[in-house]
Image (tube, grey):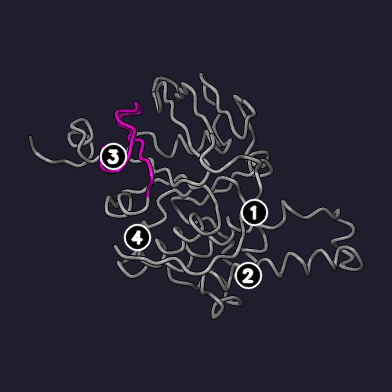
């Protein structure tokens, strides 16, 4: 897959971590639901400025791991260190305020709202005026609204979705809905962007477009990305490092070239015969 990044425009937050430094460290995380172990003693890190892929067969614990990172699940064991702060538990809205945004395996948008309003919803965490000011839509609240709307328009231009800015997202094809969801996540100006199967259900052209946007967000705009993806061509083209899960356990961790030649990965995920 051959994609090129366009000229840059900054959307990422300044998280105080030097490029290549340790942005997030997952330490011995275990999560279970009753007697079912979703992840067991998982450790890996994410470096500032990289694209970190998390792969594995269905049921390997990938989405559960993302849900722990963004605070949806609380692990029974282990901790996560993000931007130098250690935690065992966190609510999703706290994770957003600390600089973690995500997209979902199944598109989670406000279907009756326009593309513009859906992306604008991502800016709410960055707004400072209280509800009364926002209801009045006057003075400081109006100025803040205009400032945030300008940021949203930049994202719309970047994602090349100007033609659907006023269209209710429920009327959009699936590929464009995924692009709008990416826009809403970018609107939060995250330090760490979590993408849960961003290419799922897309045709080749849509995958190429999404790959181009992911590269630009990461390489040109400085946003660190952790993604789950089943398309191995996408994983090998986009990622700097790959961690592989199988039955909730880590079986490999390294560069794409090292991982794809690992016998455990071949047996568990790639399905290549001995």
Q: Mark on residue 57?
A: 3
SS category of the residue bearing label 1: loop
Nearest-to-viewer mark from 2 and 3: 2
Cα separation between marks 2 and 3: 37 Å
Contact, CB < 8 Å: mark 2 with mark 3? no
First in sequence: mark 2 or mark 1?
2
First in sequence: mark 2 or mark 4?
2
Q: Is disc 1 surrounded by few (<14), some (14 to 19) or many (20+) residues within 10 Å?
A: many
From the viewer's perspective, is residue 26 above or below residue 100? Answer: above
Residue 270 place in picture, x, y as percent: 20, 42
From the viewer's perspective, is residue 182 above or below residue 150? Answer: above
Contact, CB < 8 Å: mark 4 with mark 1? no
First in sequence: mark 4 or mark 3?
3
Cα separation between marks 2 and 1: 13 Å
Cα separation between marks 1 and 3: 30 Å
For disc 2, the marked residue is 154
First in sequence: mark 4 or mark 1?
1
Query: Measuring 48% from the left and 72% from the top, which residue is drawn there?
Result: 172
Q: Mark on residue 201?
A: 4
Contact, CB < 8 Å: mark 1 with mark 3? no
Q: Mark on residue 188?
A: 1
- On screen, residue 5 versus residue 144, left or right, reads left
Name, please, the residue furthest toward the left: 274
Query: Which quadrant of the rendered structure holds the C terminus?
Result: top left
Query: Which quadrant of the rendered structure holds the N terminus?
Result: bottom left
SS category of the residue bearing label 3: loop
- On screen, residue 21 versus residue 264, left or right, reads right
Q: Is disc 2 surrounded by few (<14), some (14 to 19) or many (20+) residues within 10 Å?
A: some
Residue 219 place in picture, x, y as percent: 48, 56
Cα separation between marks 2 and 4: 27 Å
182, 238: nearer the viewer: 238
Query: Magenta residues?
Result: 239-258
């Amino acid at each position: 897959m051959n994609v090129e990044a366009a000229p840059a425009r900054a959307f990422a937050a300044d998280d105080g971590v030097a490029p290549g430094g340790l942005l997030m460290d997952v330490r011995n995380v275990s999560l279970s639901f009753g007697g079912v172990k979703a992840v067991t003693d998982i450790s890996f890190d994410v470096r500032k400025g990289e694209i970190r892929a998390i792969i594995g067969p269905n049921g390997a614990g990938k989405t559960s791991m993302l849900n722990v990172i963004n605070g949806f699940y609380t692990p029974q064991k282990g901790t996560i260190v993000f931007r130098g702060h250690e935690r065992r538990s966190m609510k999703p809205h706290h994770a957003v305020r600390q600089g973690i945004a995500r997209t979902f395996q199944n598109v989670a948008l406000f279907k009756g709202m326009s593309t513009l309003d859906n992306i604008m919803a991502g800016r709410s965490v960055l707004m400072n005026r209280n509800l009364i000011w926002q209801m009045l839509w006057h003075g400081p609240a109006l100025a803040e609204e205009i400032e945030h709307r300008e940021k949203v328009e930049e994202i719309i231009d970047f994602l090349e979705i100007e033609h659907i800015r006023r269209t209710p997202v429920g009327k959009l094809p699936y590929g464009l809905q995924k692009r709008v969801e990416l826009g809403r996540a970018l609107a939060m100006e995250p330090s760490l962007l979590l993408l849960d199967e961003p290419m799922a259900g897309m045709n080749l052209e849509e995958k190429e477009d999404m790959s181009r946007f992911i590269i630009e967000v990461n390489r040109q705009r400085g946003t660190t990305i952790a993604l789950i993806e089943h398309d191995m061509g996408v994983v090998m083209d986009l990622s700097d490092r790959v961690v592989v899960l199988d039955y909730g356990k880590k079986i490999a961790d390294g560069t794409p070239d090292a991982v794809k030649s690992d016998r455990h990965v071949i047996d568990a995920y790639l399905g290549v015969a001995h």
